[in-house]
Structures are given as C-alpha cells and as structure tokens.
Image (cartoon, rainbow, N blue to C red):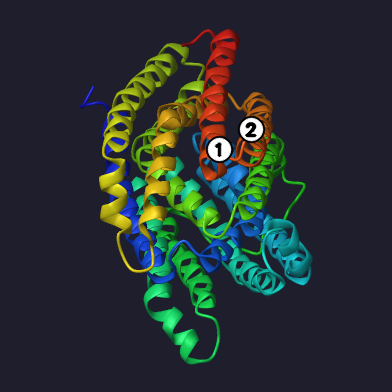
Amino acid sequence: MFKSKIFRAGALLAFFTIIGKLIGLYRDRILAGQFGASSELDVYYAAFRIPDLIFNLFILGATSSAIVPIFLEYYHKEISTAWRAAQNFLNVMAAGILAVSVVVMIFAEPLAGLIGPGFTSSQAHVLAMLIRIMLISSIIFAVSTILGSILQALQRFLVYSLASIFYNLGIIVGAIWFVPLFESWGYLGIYGLGFGVVLGALLHLLIQLPVAWRAGFRFTLLFDIYDGAFRRMISLMLPRTLALGAYNIGLVVITSIASLLGSGSITILNLATNLQFVPISIVGISLATAVFPQLSTHAAKNELLEFKKKLNHALWLTLVFTGLLAVAIFIFRNIIVDAIFKVGQFKDADRALTASVVGIFMFSAVSQSLMHVVTRAYYSFQNTKTPFWVSVFAIALNVALSYILGLKFDMGVRGIAVATAIAYNIHFILLLIIFNTKYRLY
C-alpha cells in the first residue's frame, strides 16, 4: 500500500496540502485577531460568493472534469494536438470570464443586496466594492487553474501543490501590510484584504507558469470555438459546471441565511468550514487528484481491472486516513480552535461556537473525502451528468435544511452545520450506489 504510485503522489500532495493548510489557518488567525467575528469580516467572506460563482461556472467545472481526461487522450496520440487544445481552451475561457466580470462589476451594488439581506446599506456598499476587487483575482485564477490542471494531467504535482501556499501568502501579506496601508490612506482596511486576494492569485499563477512553459505550454492568439477538442471539453464540462453553479448558488443562499443570524455568523461558518477542509484536503482531495490521471488513462484504454484496483485502493486510503484525522479533530476541537483563534478580537463565545460547528462538520468529513474520489471515477469515464444530478439534489437538500434548522428551528449556524453534514453524507451514499449499479467496478 505505502509503495504504490497513488500513495506516493498522494503523500506528496498531502504534505504540501498540510503546509498550505497550516498557512491558511495562520491566515485565519490573523483575520480573526484583527477583526474578530464581526460584520466587517462577514462582508469580506460574503464578497467571495459572486466571483467564486463566475470562476466555477467558467473554469472549475472544466479543470475538475474535462481538461485532464481529454488532454491525456490527445497527449497519448499526438502531443502537439494536446497542447493546441489546451491553449485554445485557455484563451476562449479567459475571454469569457473577463467579459462576464466586467458586467458584474457594473451591477455589483444590486448583487450585494441579494447576497447580504441582513447587511446595512453601508455594509452593502463595501460588499459591492470588494466584489469588484475579487473579480480581478478570478480572471487571474482562470489562467492559473487551467495551467494547474494541465500540470496535474502530466503528474507534475509539486508545483501544483505549491500554488495554493503562495495564494495564502498573498492574503497574509494583504492582512499584515495592505490593511494598515489602506487605513493610512484613509480607506477601509478591509479593502487591503481584497487586494491581498488579488496578490495571492497572481502568485498562484507565477509559481506554475515556468513549469508549464517548460512542459510545452505557450501563450498564443489561438481562438477557435469550433475546434473539436474545445467542443468536447465544453460538452463534458457542462454538467459539472451546472453542478458547481448550483453549489455556489446554494452557498449564496446559505450566506444570505447566515447574514440574518446576527453579526459574526458568516465569519464563524467560514472559519469552521476552513478547519473542516483540513482532513478533506490533506487526504480526500490529494488522493483524488493523484489517482485521477491514472483512472482516466485506464478508462481511456478500457483497462477495467486496473481501474478497479486503483479506485478501491484510493477509496481505502481515503477512508482510513480521513477517518483518523476526523476523529482526532472532533476530540480535540476545542483545543484546536483555542490554539488558532485565541487571539485579538476573537471572543470566548465565538471560539466555543466555532468549535461546536467544527465538531458537527466532522460527521461528514469522511463522506466528503470519499466523494471526491468517486466523482473522479465518474469523470474518468467522461460521465459528468450523473454527479451533476446527485449534486443538485444534495445542494437543494442542504439549502432547505439550512433554512429550516438555522432560521425556523432557531439553531443558528449550528443548524446550517447539521444541514451541511446531512446533505454531504447523503450525497456520497447516492454517488457510490449509482456508480456501483452503473459500472459494477466497485
């Protein structure tokens, strides 16, 4: 088990994910210390929702489902054709996200009112300004993430892993230096955080660009929406894109619900979510990323026995290691939260509530990790429709339960956490049952 290629690649990704998560937690510590569980930080986290929605619709759906299997299919036949497909896709999608971002920048004010119905008019204005700033980072991320998916396909995992670390470093620079700088200029310090996100996105790109260049990528003026490879990628990514769109719309709705639960609710929910993703990212996403190119290759060559072995191996590793981490985090959740957030403006009651939410999230950490692996198995067969419909159902369930438990049953952010845990567990169970029924491989 420990000598397998999947384990070694997953271990490399997990190691740098740990480094990245530690830096990310340090980032959260700085933000919590500076701003506390405040409406100001609520606005900052809410500002990510629209840029993330646009980015996921145009880019993440393709990079998580379409680029790797199709790029590898062409790469095994003719390398130049594969690079041409990747270059064309990047140009078209970057242009698309730029055009949509300009439109959203114009209408940021009314969108801010939809995201934060519980915000005051002045807070909504700040939210609109932050959305405009964050959109700059989404445009940069469009290029960087496509390059990262190509490096992932080529199993260049080292620089792919380092990119997220540099992204968090950019945000830390924003918190430590940009915030006081903007305040000294007479602006709100929170705008400095926004430009820290832009810096992080730029660093995310710059760390990957030299390796992608050496691997064969070139920026060209190629722009062909009728290209066969591009059309195949669009066709394959569409269900995943719709699923991500539904997911982000669900997040917008849940953020709106959280904005009605009192000052600091969005902040606590986001900080707890970041802690939740420590075991999921370290194990689930790392192993899913490591095994995806291999599953795609076996599926393309119809090597079903090898596919089954790799999939079962990845699922077993994910179950064991995520389970151990989730149990440890649940047991020591109060100690962990105090160690990270017992600083500055973050109050005792806010830490206690954050620890409670983290504990609830741990009941779905294993399912979320396994879900990433099973979803990649679907994508390896170029099946993005089934995960889409399952995802839509789970998102609708999450939103409905968040409203019922969070608002109607007056459980607050704990209610949203319970709703999220239930939805993710059902999501994974449905994915696994349908996959086993459809492919008979697991």
Give the left or right position of residue 163, taking residue 296 as reference.
left
Give the left or right position of residue 419, taking residue 202 as reference.
right
Mark 1 highlights which residue?
415
Viewer-proximal residue, 303 or 438? 438
Q: Is residue 37 visible?
A: yes
Does 321 sit above or below residue 410?
Answer: above
Viewer-proximal residue, 269 or 301? 269
> The residue tagged with tag 2: helix, strand or loop?
helix
Residue 289 in the image, given as x and y percentages of width and height: 42, 37
Query: What number of labels is visible?
Result: 2
Residue at 59% x, 14% y is 434
Does 437 sit above or below residue 283?
Answer: above
Q: Amino acid at mark 2?
A: Leu
Does 141 sit above or below residue 439?
Answer: below
Q: Quadrant of the N terminus?
A: top left
> The residue tagged with tag 1: helix, strand or loop?
helix
Quadrant of res 178 = bottom left
Residue 67 in the image, given as x and y percentages of width and height: 57, 41
Residue 174 in the image, given as x and y percentages of width and height: 43, 74
Few, some or many residues within 10 Å of mark 2 (<14, 14–19, 20+):
many
Q: Is residue 369 visible?
A: no
Residue 80 in the image, given as x and y percentages of width and height: 54, 47
Cβ atoms at labels 1 and 2 below 8 Å apart: yes
